[in-house]
Image: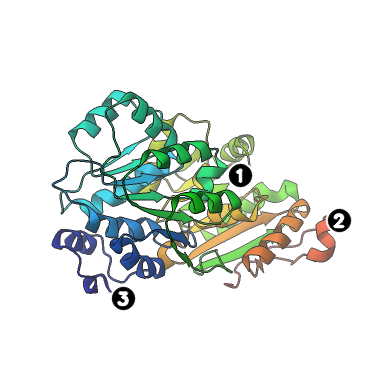
Amino acid sequence: MKFSELGLSPGVMKAVTEMGFSELTPIQEQTFALIREGRDLIALAETGSGKTSACGIPLAERIDPAIKAIQALILVPTRELALQYVDELDRIGKQSGIASFAIYGGFSMSIQKAKLESGVHVLVATPGRLIDHLYNSTLTLEQVRSVVLDEADEMLKMGFVEDVNFILSCILNRHQTLLFSATMAKDVEELANTFLHEPVRIELNREDVSPQSIAHRFRFIAHQDRLPVLKQYFAEENPGQSIIFCNSKRNGELLFQGLKGVVNSLEYIHGGLEQDRRTSIFDRFKKGKIQVMVATDVAGRGLDFSRVSHIFNYDFPGAAENYVHRTGRTGRMGREGVAISLVTGRDLDAVKKLCREKNIRPSWDGRMPDLNKEAVKGGNPGGFRRGGRRR
C-alpha cells in the first residue's frame, strides 16, 4: 500500500513525501488504521521494521496542534532512543505545527521545564526523568490521548517496571496504549493485561525475528586469532560503515587499541561514557562521520543507523536476543546487510541455541565445525575463505 492512498492530512503527507516514504512497510500497513482509530495495540516485530514511523505517522494524524498540551506520550528505555524518536517525529510533524520534545536524565531539568511550558504536543521520555518532572514541575498528562511503550521488554529488563506502572496509573483520562516489543516476556504480558483495553495483537515474523535482508556469516577460530582475523576481514573485504560488538567494556577497550591505525575513522562507545559524549558519537556515526564503531550492547538495541553495512560480533553474545538486536543495526527497512560473527569453541553451544531459536541457517567462512561434538570439546578452527550464502 502507498502512503498516498491513506488520506493523510496535507501537512503530514508533505512531510512523508519529503522523507522519501512511498510504500508502507508490513508493520506500518498492519498497524496504521488501528492506531488512527484509537485502538490499543500489541505489536511484536523484527528490529528495523519501521516501528518508529509505524506509530509516529498515525499519531501525528491524531494530534490537534491548536491544543497546547501533551497529547501523545512515548516511553523509551534510553536517552539515545529518545533522541532518535524525536528526530523522526520532528520530521513527521514539521509541516503541521506539531511540537515534539524529549526528556531524559543527564540534562538540565530547568531547560526541559522551560521547553515543556512553551508547549509540547508529543513527549518522548525515559521513565525516571518523566517521574522527576511529574513531582517537580508543572508537567501534567491530563490531555494525553495516546501512550506508546516502545522497546517494552527492554524497559522492564532494565528495572523500570515500577516506574512504568506508576506513570500509566497517573493517566486517568481515556486513552489508547500502543505496546511495541521484540519479545513477549511474562512481565510484558502482565503489563499489557493490566493497562491495555482489548488490544489487537500483531506478530510479524514470529518464527524468524532477524531481518530477512541480512547475510549471517560465522567464522570458527581459536580465541587468540580473533584480532588478526578481524583485521583480515577489513583488509580483504573493505566493509562499509561497521559496528564491532564486544561483551564487556574491557574487551572493547582492548579491541579499540588493537584497531588503531588499522581502520580509518574509529570510535569506541560504551555505557561508562558521559551522556554528552555518547550522544556526540551516535550523532557523528549516524551522519557518516565515523566509519567504524567499537561498541558494547549500549548500541545494540533500537537505534537506527541507515548507513551500516556490516556488523561484527568480536565477542559472540551469550543470549540469542542480543544477537538479533546487534545484527539488526544493519539490514534496516529491507536494505541488505552482513553480520559476521567470530566463534570460538566455547561459543558453539550459544550458536546452536541461536540457530534453533531464531531459525538462522549459518554460513561458515572456512571450516564448518561439528556443532554436536565441538560444542563440547572446542575443536581446531580451519582456514579462511571469503563469501557466504545468504540464509
Residue at numbered disc 3 = 1
One can see residue 342 in this view? yes
Between the residue at mark 1 and the residue at mark 2, the CA separation in whole angstroms equals 24 Å
**Mark drawn on residue 222:** none
For the point 49% across and 53% down, the residue is 192
Characterize the local packing of mark 2: few (<14), some (14-19) or many (20 or more) Cα atoms within 10 angstroms: few
Residue at numbered disc 2 = 377
SS at circle 2: helix
Q: Where 204 falls versus 93 (above or below)?
A: below
Counting from the top left corner in percent of width and height, residue 125 is at 37, 39
SS at circle 3: loop
For the point 21% across and 44% down, the residue is 99
Relative placement, left or right, of 346 versus 211 is right
Q: Nearer the viewer, mark 1 or mark 3?
A: 3
Name the amino acid type tagged 2.
Answer: Lys
Residue at numbered disc 1 = 246
Along the line of sight, which residue is nearer the eye, 241 or 120? 120
Counting from the top left corner in percent of width and height, residue 57 is at 28, 59
Along the line of sight, which residue is nearer the eye, 104 or 273? 104
Name the amino acid type tagged 1.
Answer: Cys
Tell whether label 2 touches label 3 (CB within 8 Å).
no
Between the residue at mark 3 and the residue at mark 2, the CA separation in whole angstroms equals 52 Å
* Quadrant of the rendered image containing residue 157: top right
Tell whether label 3 touches label 1 (CB within 8 Å).
no
Counting from the top left corner in percent of width and height, residue 86 is at 31, 46
Q: Where 376 falls versus 372 (above or below)?
A: above
SS at circle 1: loop
